[in-house]
Amino acid sequence: NAGVTQTPKFRVLKTGQSMTLLCAQDMNHEYMYWYRQDPGMGLRLIHYSVGEGTTAKGEVPDGYNVSRLKKQNFLLGLESAAPSQTSVYFCASSPPGGFAQHFGDGTRLSIL
Amino acid sequence: AQTVTQSQPEMSVQEAETVTLSCTYDTSENNYYLFWYKQPPSRQMILVIRQEAYKQQNATENRFSVNFQKAAKSFSLKISDSQLGDTAMYFCAFMTLNRDDKIIFGKGTRLHILP
């Protein structure tokens, strides 16, 4: 049972570099979400998607872009990484209708 | 705007004891869902329990149960017969129906189960 898979699991970047985090789900879920988790802050929503080809901003979208070209994949991009983006990033997916979100194992990203 | 407050940043209890984690939320909505998620040191986010606001009956899952007080906007989690494997960060979460199922998380309670 793969569920929600995030790649990579760890990454270190230098300030100004770009990178893309990949989230893939095999549960045919319509909804997908990207969160960041910082100490003492809980999880905060960055961007989300309610279907293939659609995306929307969450609580903390600045500095990030997303794309959902295929239903099963949701990509999170950092165009010019900043130290403030050092965090653990979680992807989640769910069917519509108030169901719990299923989470990936997270990506630890450090920006030097 | 909806908010979720967990007033206990950290708690410790002895193994086999019962512990209650507090959560309050603020909303003007009537239809919503509430969740408790567990995050052990492995970093995985694991669903513990889900409560539908229109149901008066409190949700239970084995040793985990909730005390849902809709009027008071309170949603506490009770863990009975606590085990070492219950050591984790616990997040209370709120979802408004028909708002793209976005979840708002509390800041978490770190729970230590002591041997």
Image (cartoon, coloured by chain):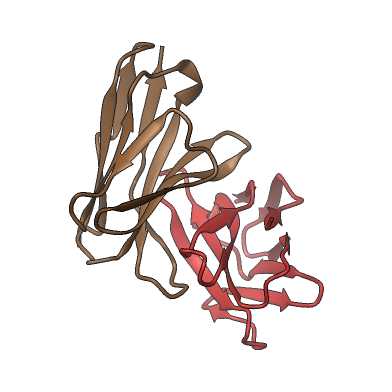
Chain colours: A brown, B red
Number of numbered discs: 0
Residue B8 placed where, x, y %? Answer: 74, 49
Figure quadrant of the N terminus of chain B = bottom right
Left or right: A77 in relation to B12: left
Please tell me which residue lies in front, A44 or A58: A58
Let me know if residue A33 appears in the view.
no
Residue B44 placed where, x, y %? Answer: 40, 49
Residue B3 location, quadrant: bottom right
Please tell me which residue lies in front, B37 or B53: B53
Residue A92 placed where, x, y %? Answer: 37, 54
Residue displayed at 61% across by 69% down:
B81
Please tell me which residue lies in front, B70 or B96: B96
Q: Is residue B74 above or below residue B108?
A: below
Q: Is residue A34 above or below residue A38?
A: below
| Residue lying at the far right of the rendered structure | B72
Left or right: A22 in relation to B17: left
Residue displayed at 34% across by 11% down:
A14
Residue displayed at 81% across by 72% down:
B72
Residue displayed at 19% across by 49% down:
A69
Let me know if residue A15 appears in the view.
yes
Residue A86 placed where, x, y %? Answer: 45, 24
Please tell me which residue lies in front, A48 or B9: A48
